[in-house]
Image (spheres, rainbow, N blue to C red):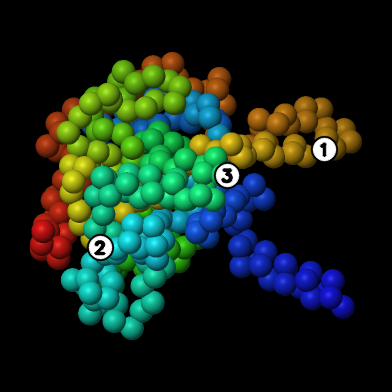
Amino acid sequence: MLLLVVAAARAGAAQAEETADPGSLTNSIGMQLVPIRPGEFLMGSPPTEQPRGVDEQRHPVKITRAFYLGKYEVTQDQYERIAGSNPSYFAAGGGGADSVADQDTSQLPVETVSWDDAVEFCRLLSELPEEVEAGRVYRLPSEAEWEYACRAGTTTAFHAGTALGVRQANIDTIAGTRTVQVGSYAANPFGLHDMHGNVLEWCADWYDAAYYAASPREDPPGPATGTVRVLRGGSWGFTASSSRSANRFWYAPTFRTSCLGFRVAVTSAEQPAAPEPDPPQPGEADPPGPGEADPPGPAAGDLPNAVETDLPSRTETDRPQSAEHVAASVVGFLRNPT
Ligand SMILES: [Ca+2]
């Protein structure tokens, strides 16, 4: 009987975590992390994807090191437990408290955090004794890691396809006026939630519009210097096009608004194991190799060897998201006077 109860409980847990990867881990504060395995992909967008920025030149990138990435954006509860405070606008005591008065805000993503705040959170989390013992050093994902994980083998404008609707992500709509609980929308093929929408996510890199033209093909680390840091994925205050997998944003590392949050990455001693390939079937002439059992992506032989050059002749100031970018910034400032 006990076995049946345990089995039933496990079945229930499996149902609740239908996207869980068998190689995922849960850290000492209950944060779930998904293994991201090495692979190649085309970073940026094709010229046919509109609207797009001139900084999205599509080029091949190889991620050579396995890492873990937060299954969800960092929550207000997690942030407060580690940093000792909750700066969020959509929280009791925050400027947007009225709009979440009846909500449990602990599982909303933390926002109104700067790049500096996010990096400090990673440092403090890494110093927890349990995390030190496990050899987990937390950091922000690189811009390339973020897009690789967001695309999860897809080549369309969004991991969910060529368009993004309000049933798929928390993006700007008449109804979408605030953050929502992390994981409220379906995960991408890697099991990651809210890569599109909810809060924009800080990446480790400095931003440089011209970086893709000269970046290394393997594990590009971002420019050596800069004045603004990269953010990815759009937010509740931005329209769908700003959530495109290739879309790039930037803000000063000290900037905070209610649209900005983050998720953590970790390169761990507990390296994700490669999935077991399916056993070859009788009569199968060319069984898949281990690499092919990984999430789908363009084969190395399909990757062009150079940055695509047939870019639209628009200037930086023509970025299609500029108007809403500025609008959301203004909204953020108005809602979060600092
Ligand atoms: Ca997000």
How far apart marks 2 and 1 lie (CA) works out to 51 Å
Q: CA distance from mark 2 to mark 3?
A: 29 Å
Please, which residue is most extreme toward the bottom here?
102
At x 77% / y 39%, what residue is drawn? 278
Q: Give the mark, 2 or 3, whose residue is nearer the N terminus.
A: 2
Which label sits in the foreground, 2 or 1?
Answer: 2
Tell which of 195 and 77 is nearer to you.
77
Disc 3, SS: helix
Q: Secondary structure at mark 1?
A: loop
Residue underneath mark 2: 87
Query: Going 36% across and 79% down the picture, which residue do you hit?
Result: 103
What x and y, as percent, mark residue 54?
Answer: 23, 31
Q: What kind of element bears circle 2?
A: loop
Mark 1 lies on residue: 279
Q: What type is the residue that disc 1 sits on?
A: Pro
Quarter assignment of residue 332: bottom left
